[in-house]
Amino acid sequence: GRQFVDDLAQLLGHVDVAASTNPTGTTRLGGDWYLEYASGAIESELPFAVAGMQGLNHNLGCTFLNAYAYYGGNKVGYFAGGAYHSSMVSPNAVHADPWTNQTDFNNNSGLCSSSNTAPTFVTATPASLSVAQASSANDIKSLLHVSDSDAGQTETWSQSVAPSHGTLSFTNATANSGSADIPPGGAITYTPTASYVGSDSFTVQVSDSAATPGTATLVINVTVGSARTVTVNALTLNAMTAGTAFVSQSFSGAGGYGSYTYSVSAGSLPAGLSLNAGSGALTGTPTTAGAFNFTIQATDSSTGSGPYSGTLAFSGTVNAAVVNGACGTSSGSTFTSAPGANLCSTGTSTGVTSNTNTYTWGCIGSGGGTNDNTCSATRKYTQTITFAQPAVQTFGASPTLSASSDSNLTVTFSSGTAPVCTITGGGALTFVTAGNCTINADQAGDSTYTAASQVARTFAVNAVVPAQPTIGAATAGDTQASVAFTPGSTGGAAVTYSVTCTSSGTGATGSNTGGASPIVVTGLT
């Protein structure tokens, strides 16, 4: 190697030549490179050429070199990746030929890496978002502006954590860096699960295009929709008659999301009828006459904080069946009790036993006349009134009484003791005086029900005990005194007041009574 260097120097006109046997790079890359042999005067002249510095930059493992400077002695400083670095060149000397020396270039500033400003979201985390239930492709770009002062990079938005109750979509979601307010390009949207109502959350990430990318994340908390107010649409039920197929009707819901399911939440359907939970259809044939009460509930298809429900109550009466048969000798007559064997027969039976119910029979002709051997019968049902015992009352009060019948027909009231109390048909009481008040409850019946048995309730009406009067002024006169006072209560029965006065001079005493202020006491001599 030494002979080759010397020969090469002579062949080139005695120029200075240097050679190295292991240019392995800097310590950062696993070792140093060494100048093993030199022929002639080998020295470094400052400032270094750009090409030489680029070679140094390569050996020191940096991606680029912005500038360099010689600081004197054996120290070389340079900027790589936006940061300052220094290398020691040792020894710093010029030697004459022949001279063999070794020079180390060491990176004394540590690893050389690029400096990068990571993007940051302009909106503070967590951000808030409200969207409607069943909405689609809600634009959320306004929440995702970022700041990144580095120029020449590309910002890219992506999903970091997926929503639990919806989906995120990113289409060409990029933008150029170099601004304090960078809106994302393309489209970024959030779509909640269609039926869902409640809270959701997801995280969006933005990254720049540096060799070592800078990233930032933003959590977005979402409120999806709000509670629904579900109602059951009003419906007038078709007439119902025992033994006759009901003309089907369907209940329907409103105000909720999606399809509804239907149920009876209170009471019960008339015997023989059924409700389709999916369609809300009421179908069947009533089997028993009488009153009914039931409540229909409609429930929507919302999930999350749903589903939501609404109700509507229904009441009415299943009419008694009309019985047709053969008419006997009493055609055209109407009776309010079970007929005898000679009046009418129904089916294979002759006559009808009323038991606790009443039948009304009448013979009619097919053309509207009589005596053509046909008849019809309508069964009437009994009803019972419920009337609670009123509490003891005080004169001057104005209570309202209530009662009900199991037929759902309206109960009316009347007073049995008008000198003590009166009452309206709706139950509003007025007391005339203290004493015992008797109130009667009645229900007259209709085409399906017989009149109910009257229910009477008696209760006491107590007088108001007057409060003690308040003495006002006592005015002395000639052998008399006038005493003014204020009654403790007014109204009701008359109250008598007694006044006694004593003369302070003679000690004479006198008394008097009266029903109003003032009362004059005489004889005070």
Image (cartoon, helix red, strand yellow):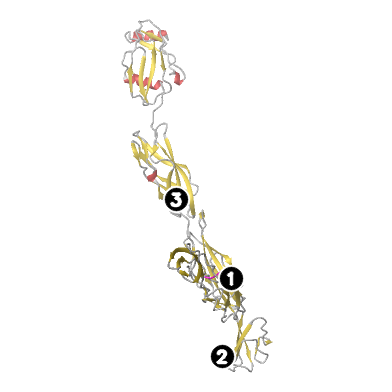
Between discs 2 and 3, the one toward the N terminus: 3
How packed mark 2 is, by other alpha carbons closer than 10 Å (few <14, some 14-19, many 20 or more), is: few
Judged by its main secondary structure, the magenta piece is loop
Tell me whether the residue at label 3 lies in contact with that at label 1, contact meaning CB atoms closer than 8 angstroms: no
Q: Does 10 sit left or right of 388 as displayed?
A: left
> Which residue is identified by label 3?
191
> Which residue is identified by label 1?
390
Residue 223 location (% of width, % of height): 45, 50
| Amino acid type, residue under disc 2 in the picture | Ser
Secondary structure of the residue carrying tag 3 is strand
Between discs 3 and 1, the one toward the N terminus: 3
Q: Indicate which label's residue lies in the foreground, 2 or 1.
A: 1
Residue 103 location (% of width, % of height): 40, 12
> Which residue is identified by label 2?
366
Taking the magenta stretch, the answer to whether it contains residue 168 is no
Residue 460 in view here: yes
Q: Which residues are magenta?
A: 390-395
Q: CA distance from mark 2 to mark 3?
A: 70 Å
Q: Which of these two is toward me, 420 or 430?
A: 420
| Amino acid type, residue under disc 3 in the picture | Thr
